[in-house]
Amino acid sequence: MSETVLTPPRENVEPKTLVEGAYQRLRRDIIEGVHPPGEKLRVEHLKDQYDVGAGTLREALLLLVTDALVVAQGQRGFRVAPISIEDFEDITRTRILLETEALRQSIALGGEDWEAGIVAAFHRLSRAEQKLGGQDDYVHTAAEDWEKRNRAFHDALIAASPSRWIRHFQNILYQQSERYRRISLFRRPIPRDVHAEHEALFDATLARDADRATAILAEHILRTLESVRHMPTDFFTSPAKH
């Protein structure tokens, strides 16, 4: 059976149009909290900030609506989607269901090319994790690199799953979890060794131990939920800007 080639996520593709460029910049700023949850996204202000026309900016905002990062309010414009611990719990539980099933399928069906992709992605991720450092020296540029390589590693793990629908919905959930995951990385509320978690997942997957690998993956995803639970409650109640 031939292995499925995953299409790169839209946010990781080199922009070829003004809309794609505006989309990626807006998405990054929403993920990083430059535009906080609930903020009114005024086209007349943002078009100057992002140096694009109003039509281009609206198209970019509509792409972010499909990512569920922006909410369209009819004639009232757009707002950054809200966040809540209840929402992240739902995202996390659903992501575990889909991603562990995709991993189990990949372990059963993946061949040498799939294994080689995991080895390469893990190597690149390990190099990025070395740059992050162990304690409080969280550097923005290193974090950006880590986020991309972390995504590539998780994608490589499930690349042999034959279900495009599982991968499609997993992609949406991964994007949603990214906002919350970055909180965890920035504030480090509970100690964790992310590299050790990835290494254990890598070893179990290449050993073709589906039960162990999926259990490690589920625990790995849950650890971020536990980290976010330790955030101050006011983080989830950012007032909307008018």
Image: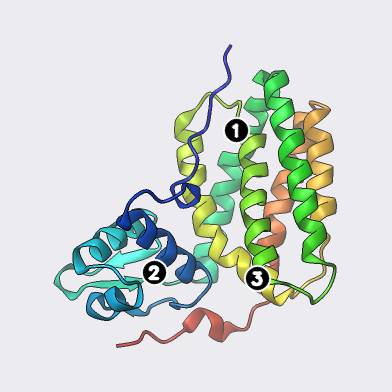
Query: Label 2 near label 3: C-beta < 8 Å?
Result: no
Type of the residue with mark 2 = Ala
Give the side of residue 181 with respect to residue 120, left or right.
Answer: left
Q: Give the residue number, with chain letter if any, for mark 3.
A: 140
Q: Give the residue number, with chain letter if any, for mark 2.
A: 81
Task: Pick the residue in front: 170 or 90.
Answer: 170
Give the side of residue 128 with respect to residue 2, left or right.
Answer: right
Q: What label sits on residue 148 in the rendered view?
A: none
Q: Give the residue number, with chain letter if any, for mark 1.
A: 102
Q: Is residue 67 above or below residue 100?
A: below
What is the CA distance from the residue labelled 1 to the residue labelled 3? 31 Å
Quadrant showing the N terminus? top right
Type of the residue with mark 1 = Ala
- Callout 3: few (<14), some (14-19), or many (20+) C-alpha neighbours within 10 Å? few
Q: Nearer the viewer, mark 3 or mark 2?
A: 3
Task: Pick the residue in front: 169 or 123.
Answer: 123
Residue 32 percent across, percent down from the top left = 53, 71
Type of the residue with mark 3 = His
Quadrant showing the C terminus? bottom left
Query: Which circle's residue, 3 or 2, is located before the other in the chain?
Result: 2
Q: Secondary structure at mark 1?
A: helix
Residue in the image at 58% along x and 52% along y:
93
Give the side of residue 221 with respect to residue 192, left or right.
Answer: left
Query: Which circle's residue, 1 or 3, is located before the other in the chain?
Result: 1
Query: Which circle's residue, 1 or 2, is located before the other in the chain?
Result: 2
- Callout 1: few (<14), some (14-19), or many (20+) C-alpha neighbours within 10 Å? many
Residue in the image at 84% along x and 36% along y:
203
Residue 155 percent across, percent down from the top left = 61, 39
Q: Secondary structure at mark 3?
A: helix
What is the CA distance from the residue labelled 3 to the residue labelled 2? 23 Å
- Callout 2: few (<14), some (14-19), or many (20+) C-alpha neighbours within 10 Å? some
